[in-house]
Image: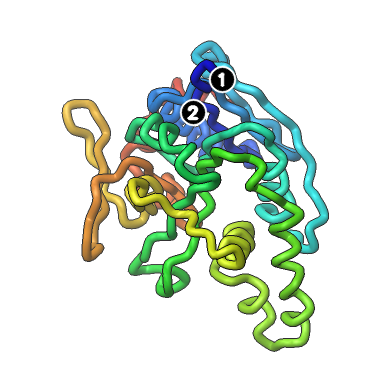
Amino acid sequence: MAEQRLKLVTIMNYPPEPNFQRMCGLFLDSVIAAGAESITILYEDHTPRVSARHHRMIDIELRKCRSHDVGHPHFNLRFKLPNLAALDYPFLYLDADIYVLGNLEYLWSRRNSKPWIGIDHQWVPGDPRTHRTPFLNSGVQLVGDPDFYDLKAILAVQNAVAPLAEHSRFAKQELFACPGADQAVLYRYFRSLGYDYTHPEIGPEWNSCAGITEIQSRNGVWKARTTGLPENDDVQLIHYWSQYKPWAIGCPIFASASIAESNEFA
């Protein structure tokens, strides 16, 4: 059987604003350079503006999807979770607010070692939400067995606790097992199975919060390393989640993107 191409999936449902467009363009630049061989972009009501240059570089599919009624209105629950679970092929999912420095083949080559691989959220000094026992960050998902991504089973576990939460003044905390929406639901599901979603060779360097990542250009190549943590890592993947969007933190990669590149998406 022929080796499967590195299939990358992302979601781009951002409003048509220049900062988001440039961020998504840089995302595509990075994943293509890092080894993605085919990209599927899911969206709902904001059609991604993918440049002709990117379309020439790689097979890119734009797939309009719909939200699903899963009992909660959060976008990541009604859209991200059900639409990723519906995919019927192995894939590497990355949030579009990511910039990849490492080689994605490193991740892809490990897809068959477990049916679903994720990475724990980093402890971020300035974000109290992360100051707890390790929990999942769903911005990076390596899915080797799509059948394991069982939406019906995932929701059944979550729905079992929903009636209890309705009668508690701590409803939100009890309804979601950790910070986040889809990642909290997945985290509860994996705990119910006694399933360890982590991989010993895929650590936080593959999902590093931009807020604790120092980025430098060395001989024209971007390098990054975490800073301010007890153990700092050479970063392979920068994640601009939440308040750490690249324009908000003065990311040098974002700042160095040329006007011509940003205008591709205007």
Q: Nearer the viewer, mark 1 or mark 2?
A: 2
Tell me where residue 231 sits by quadrant.
bottom left
* In-image side of 104 versus 136 (left or right): left
Q: CA distance from mark 1 to mark 2?
A: 10 Å
Instruction: Determine whether the residue tagged by mark 1 lies in a helix, strand or loop.
Output: loop
| Three-letter amino acid code of the residue under disc 2 | Leu
Quarter of the image that includes the C terminus: top right
Image position of 253 with respect to 176: above or below: above
CB atoms at circles 1 and 2 under 8 Å apart? yes
Kindly indicate the quadrant of the structure image that contains residue 109.
Answer: top left
What residue is shown at x 24% (from left), y 38% (from top)? Answer: 223
Q: Looking at the image, which residue is at 74% across and 39% down?
A: 44
Disc 1 residue type (three-letter)? Ser
Label 1 packing within 10 angstroms: few (<14), some (14-19), many (20+): some
Return the x and y of residue 97 as percentages of the image width and height. Answer: 49, 43
Q: Residue at x 63, y 40 (%)?
A: 146
| Position of residue 217 in the picture relative to residue 150 (left or right) | left
Residue that extends furthest to the right in the rendered view of this protein: 69
Residue at 67 percent of width and 74 percent of height? 175
Of callouts 1 and 2, the N-terminal one: 2
Q: Which residue is mark 2?
A: 28
Q: Which label number is shown at residue 51?
A: 1
- Answer whether residue 184 is visible to the viewer in this image: no
Q: Is residue 212 visible?
A: yes
Residue 240: x percent and y percent? 44, 49
Mark 2 packing: few (<14 Cα in 10 Å), some, or many (20+)? many
Task: State the image coordinates of residue 166 (x, y, percent, origin top left).
Answer: 77, 81
Indicate the secondary structure of the residue bearing disc 2: helix
Q: Quadrant of the N terminus?
A: top right
- Which one is in front, 58 or 5? 5
Q: Residue 180 versus residue 220: which sits nearer the camera?
A: 180
